[in-house]
Amino acid sequence: MIKNATMKPKGLFFILLLSLAVGGCKKDKKENVVFDGNYSGWFFLSNKSGVALKDSVVILMQSGQFSSLTSSSTLTTGKGTYLINGGTATFTNMEAFPDNLSVVTTAVLNGSYTYAIKGDSLLLIKTDASQNIYTYKLAK
């Protein structure tokens, strides 16, 4: 009986160790993130003085491809690809702007953004070298 009594703590220790090992193998939730859907919301450009630009925006994302359109007052379009890696979404705009003077390209998705998802809401934020902050507040 003494032999069985000493085996129980070892058995419990093994089960506890196994459960900790299995529980520690959970994948980061951001690895399987999918942005696919139609989003609408607002784009904000902020600088040290405050909000410099605010515009409505519509973005369609499907299978790593995106297209976007701002309000008719600025009429900025964008089109290209996106890739999600960890906590970053990288957008590559492929839309050509032959005359940059007639188009406000500030609201074009391009570059790396941190993101947050809450329900049907998507928040994208990027800060450039001049400390301008580009924010997209979107909902499906």
Image: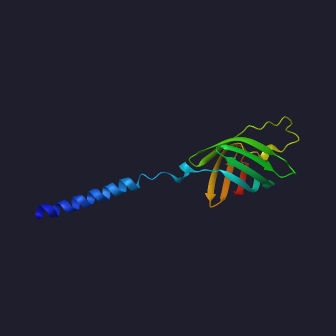
Residue at image position (74%, 56%) is: 40
Outermost residue on the top side: it is: 98
Residue at image position (67%, 55%) is: 123
Task: Depth check: give the residue in front, 122 or 66.
Answer: 66
Count of number-bearing discs = 0
Regarding residue 45, the answer to whether it shows in the image is: no
Residue 88 rendering spot, x and y as whole percentages: 61, 47
Task: Depth check: give the residue in front, 127 or 88.
Answer: 88
Residue at image position (71%, 45%) is: 66
Residue 135 rendering spot, x and y as whole percentages: 72, 53
Residue 112 rendering spot, x and y as whole percentages: 66, 44
Residue at image position (29%, 58%) is: 15
Q: Is residue 29 left or right of residue 65?
A: left
Residue 97 rendering spot, x and y as whole percentages: 82, 37
Regarding residue 100, the answer to whether it shows in the image is: yes
Q: Is residue 98 left or right of residue 120?
A: right
Figure check: 86 above or below 15: above
Quadrant of the image containing the N terminus: bottom left
Occupied quadrant, residue 10: bottom left
Q: Is residue 60 left or right of residue 2?
A: right
- What color scheme is it? rainbow
Quadrant of the image containing the C terminus: bottom right
